[in-house]
Image: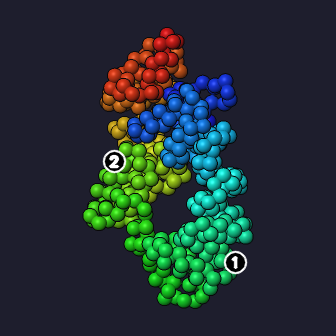
Amino acid sequence: MSTRWLSVAVLLFSSACGADGPPLPVVPPEGLEPAVAARLAAAYATAEDDASAEHLLDYGRVLFGHRHHAAAFDVLRRAAALGGPVAFESTYLAALAASESDLAEAERLMTRALRMEPRFVAGHVKHGMFREELDRLADAEFSYTAALRIERSSHALLGLGRVALARGEPDRAIGLLEGARVLDPRHHEVDVALAQAYTAKGWTDDARAARDRATGHAEITAIPDPVLNRALDQNVSYHGLVDRAQHRYISGDVRGALALVDLAVLVDAAHARAHLVSCQILRDMGDHEGAIIACNRVLAVTPKHAEALARRGTAHAELEQIEAAEASLREAVAIGGELPLPRRELARFLLTQENAAEARTLLETLLRDHPDDLLARLLMASVHAKAGEWDAAHAQAEYVVRRRPTDVIARRLMAEAARER
């Protein structure tokens, strides 16, 4: 998260630095679906009130589940340092979170986790994957073999097959990978590796068959999600899949939502709607590069799509790509100025750039057109607070609380305004 965007988040979701150390990381709620924001806020509040290892682990799980990996790593590392019964799970999840940016640290943490639980098969497989990506093939082979000694796992055989391929041993790779395919015939990564091994041997027909399995129906049905399997069985339409994805995301099932979106894209890659939903989910989860890619796919289909331009601009802003952010957001307002989202996102951006005057003008016109836009009212409350207009800030926050009594951010703004005025 960029420092500029964090400055606005602090106004909306502030936390005091406790006596025991630095404050817990906080995810700004702006733009999140209400169910996701509420889950994050509740887990944060519990851990802030009682920073036990168990509560820190719970908060770390929620952060990790919604792909806020840097924040999850911070919280989980604290939980692991406290020791006790949750030390293994905290360390294991911290390793997974670290793998997004620091493989060496991830490998070190996984080594520590496996000392606590030496018979954890998935941990040995992940350990091997980290070592493989670090180009430590002998260590990766050791980890995958350790997993196989505990359980005959298709994932461990796949890892050993990849190591053999990296060493230029296609015959050994084929034996391992065909064994993995016997255990899990719908594992598309096994077919990808088999296609590479068959190609290395010059077995053109076998390679083509493996590639077809990897990119065809086998890849879709390999997703271990019963909802996806039901969707396939019922031949759900493209729009039905996107509708289900949005419902699952609102319900807090982020992984299921993304899987359904991916399936919708496979059904119709040229349609903009699934890419737009993917853009929204990825941005809310902190994967801003992925959000930009998804928004660009929408714009490739519909170049003047105001919502995609606005969401892309917000993602650029999170990456501190200021010029790109402003250009995309202003284009969104120029094209779809009658819509709430472009004006709201441009106003949010302007606040981070200390341009409260233009942000105020945008929000005033937006609220005249859409008086029940609660996110716009929270932003306007922030504008009033910056200007020391505490009565107005309190009124905007109170409006939100009357309509959404569980809104933690609005309640905190009300309390802050009540203290200051």
Which element type, helix, strand or loop, lies under badge 2? helix
Q: Quadrant of the N terminus?
A: top right
Q: CA distance from mark 1 to mark 2?
A: 46 Å
Q: How crowded is the residue under tag 2: few (<14 C-alpha within 10 Å), some, or many (20+)? A: some
Is 410 drawn above or below residue 118 in the view shown?
above
Choose top left, top right, bottom left or bottom right for residue 111. bottom right
Is 331 drawn above or below residue 138 in the view shown?
above
Residue closer to the observer: 53 or 59: 53
* For residue 152, side relative to residue 82 (left or right): left
Choose top left, top right, bottom left or bottom right for residue 400. top left
Q: How crowded is the residue under tag 1: few (<14 C-alpha within 10 Å), some, or many (20+)? A: few
Residue 167 pos. (x, y %): 69, 78
Residue closer to the observer: 2 or 197: 197
* For residue 30, side relative to residue 239 (left or right): right
In the image, what residue occupies the spot 58% across and 78% down? 176
Q: Is residue 150 visible?
A: yes
Residue 97 pos. (x, y %): 60, 49
Which element type, helix, strand or loop, lies under badge 1? loop
Q: Which residue is mark 1?
A: 167
Q: Amino acid at mark 1?
A: Arg
In the image, what residue occupies the spot 63% across and 41% down? 84
Q: Amino acid at mark 2?
A: His
In the image, what residue occupies the spot 51% across and 12% down? 419
Q: Which residue is mark 2?
A: 247
* For residue 400, side relative to residue 192 (left or right): left
Q: Is residue 331 visible?
A: no
